[in-house]
Amino acid sequence: MDVVGKSIRRPDAAEKVTGQATYTGDLEVAGMAHAKVLPSPYPHARIVRIDASRARALSGVFGVVTRHELTDIEPYYGSDVKDRPIVAIDRARYEGEPVAAVAAVDLATAEAALELIDVDYDVLPIVAAIDDALNPMSISLHESNLCHEAHYEWGDAEQGFAEADHVFEDTFTFPMVYHYAMEPHTVIAHYDETGIRVWTAAQHPFLIRNELARLYGLPLSKVQVTIPYVGGGFGSKSYIQLEPLAVALSREARRPVRLAFSVEQSARTVRRHSARLTLKTGVRKDGSFVARDCKIYMDAGAYTDNSKRVTARCADRIPGPYKWPHITVTSQGLFTNTGPAGSFRALGGPQAAWASESQIDIIAAGLNMDPLELRLKNVAAPGEMIRHDKNPLDADVATGLQKAAEFVGWEWPRPKEQPTQDGKRRGVGLACSVLNSGASPTSTALVRLHADGSATAMVSTVEIGQGSRGVMAQIAAEELGIDLDKVAVVASDTSTVPYDRSTGSSRSTTLVGLAVQLGAKEVKQQLLDLAAKHFEAPVDKLSTKEGSVVFGEEGVTYAALIRQMFGGPAGELMGRGYVTPQAQGRLSGLPVFWEMSVFAAEVEVDERVGTIRVLRLVSVADVGKAINPKQVEGQDEGAAMQGIGHTLFEEQVYEDGRLLNPNLIDYRVPTFEELPEDFETILIENEDGPGPFGAKGAGEGGIVAVAAAIGNAVYQATGVRIKDLPLTPERVWRTLQRDGKG
């Protein structure tokens, strides 16, 4: 291949590193007002009265939105369940929930106006955490505190436990985690008689368009959503967040309005689900898995957001890549008076892998068995079923495990290492998982071949830092057989580019890339048909190379064929690429592909103070075909660093429904200090994916199994099993002291 498989420089690299890239917050729209939000000071309170008359009277205020301004529209929105109000209607359900908002000539005036809004609250009891939500005596946040339940089973788990030689039961917890994308949520909205125009830092422009059209009673053609560069998302900008409120403010102010949240506000807007997972697993003496029963409780926060999918995906992912004769899984999302939980890289995957892969090592220890051997004994091979209602596994997990083990010098039994004079011990650990990735296989693309032989690919996948624009250009250039520098990519404006469902779930390269390839193929077929007439030769005797159609020793350029067709240097050929669930083969079922997560880690634990240092970390990713290998490695390693964060220290801490650490002073994220000394991504490329040139998506698997690999390494180093994340120095030290290991 000439272009695909090459580590080219990203087309947006220079713009971004020189500060020239334009983000939503950089835009200036003529006549634009600036907005501020009045947050609820209480985690749960009934709004008895709200009066914004004094705020409206303040000079420089263009508009105020309270519940009273929303009576003529449907005020609730959401990705699945429409339960989140544009501003609080009857009651506020989390601290920081918007109760009112002001659009004014500047931010200082908007802030002053907030002080003039009078609100009477009736403070209510709170549902602080999972146990409160499960308590039937607790107050209900909605019709009940059950947000969603996912359940499936096959075989007979009770029979399996009776047949097992050993049964292990363990409970694990996973913390609330904030995405900390570099750019907080930012929106500019303009509502007028022609429709709605929105510029926003978001991942799902067409889903936002659909929801705004529904809320404000407009046809889709009257809602335009434009996505400039986005400063990271990781799921925090999935579906719809601030856009309905920004539009409501513009409607009141009769002008464009910018609404930009601070980091502290964004931290309360969406987060990852914390979870408690109880796993009961039956095995035979030889390590064969017999049965598993899983009970999962996920903290969904105050509103549904994407909790239905996250709850279901966690259930999907708890079996891991293993063959289970008997299994039953129940996963519940529960409402609490905390910030709403939504999408976060690898929905439900890190929670599931932390519990499942930690218990695999517990089982290995109980059987006095090599943890690698135990996994290899039970892992499914490509083509085998791991879920009875889903496509067969297409990831080579066994090879990944062997490569990861080799990287860290795995040997068993592990040599007993004595602590050094400064009280430090080292250990290695393994973990693996798979994700049912790809989301809905619904994507379209348009490829235009211009009169000079250059091309434009028009797509809706959002560039959020993952490098999708460069990848789409590589795919188009390879399929058309033209130089990469002749391909431009236009993306992410619902009025100009064709439909795509979303950017997330590792789907862009696989599904949008496939649509681009199909569009380029259609253009190429048109070129071959034109060349067949030109050469008076059958199409099957023609080929394409370097911007020309070749017949024997002769060639004619694409530009010349277009000139012949249109009678001059004008016109263009257009190719359409459609990816739909009605497609044949693997796209007709779900998942579109299984994304693999395989990790090995070596850690050093200072038993005197409980600190953990990750010395070596390797990820093995089965990517089918890496369109841009260095970019794939960067995605994988970036995900792994996020995984190190929630493993070692990241956690949103709530007390009585109030978030105590909404900023980078109190909430730690990984820095270069936490970068492993030896950090590697190994790519498996079998060219067997459903995407273009055999590609599979990547970017989420890199976060999934990190915590379990590190936790298992900590156990190998210290003999202490910790079942709660994060593995903070205090938690490690206290556990060592409790178990007499410190």
Image (cartoon, rainbow, N blue to C red):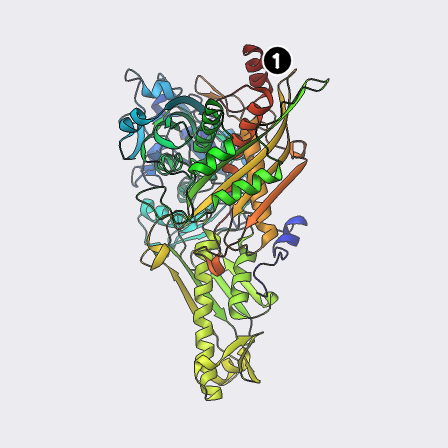
Q: Position of residue 510 (x, y in %)?
A: 46, 54
Q: Mark 1 points at which residue?
A: 742
Instruction: Identify the image quadrant of residue 619.
Output: top right
Instruction: Identify the image quadrant of residue 363.
Output: top left
Q: Which of 59 and 739 is in front in this view?
A: 739
Q: Residue at x 52, y 43 (%)?
A: 400
Q: In this view, does 739 lie above or below 415?
A: above
How many circles with numbers are drawn on the protein?
Answer: 1
Q: What residue type is labelled 1?
A: Gly
- Residue extending furthest toward the right: 421
Q: Which of 372 and 682 is in front in this view?
A: 372
- Residue extending furthest toward the bottom: 536
- State the quadrant of the N terminus: bottom right
Q: Which of 731 and 499 is in front in this view?
A: 731
The answer to whether residue 272 is seen in the rendering is no
- State the quadrant of the C terminus: top right
Q: Which of 132 and 609 is in front in this view?
A: 609
Query: In the rendered view, does 539 fall on the left or right side of 630?
Result: left
Q: Where is residue 611 in the image (x, y as percent from the top left)?
A: 63, 22
The answer to whether residue 403 is seen in the rendering is yes
Q: How crowded is mark 1: few (under 14 residues within 10 Å), some or many (20 or more)?
A: some
Query: In the rendered view, does 525 fall on the left or right side of 21?
Result: left
Q: Is residue 282 above or below residue 677?
A: above
Q: Position of residue 388 (x, y in %)?
A: 31, 43
Q: Is residue 564 above or below residue 67?
A: below
Dot 1 lies on which element? loop
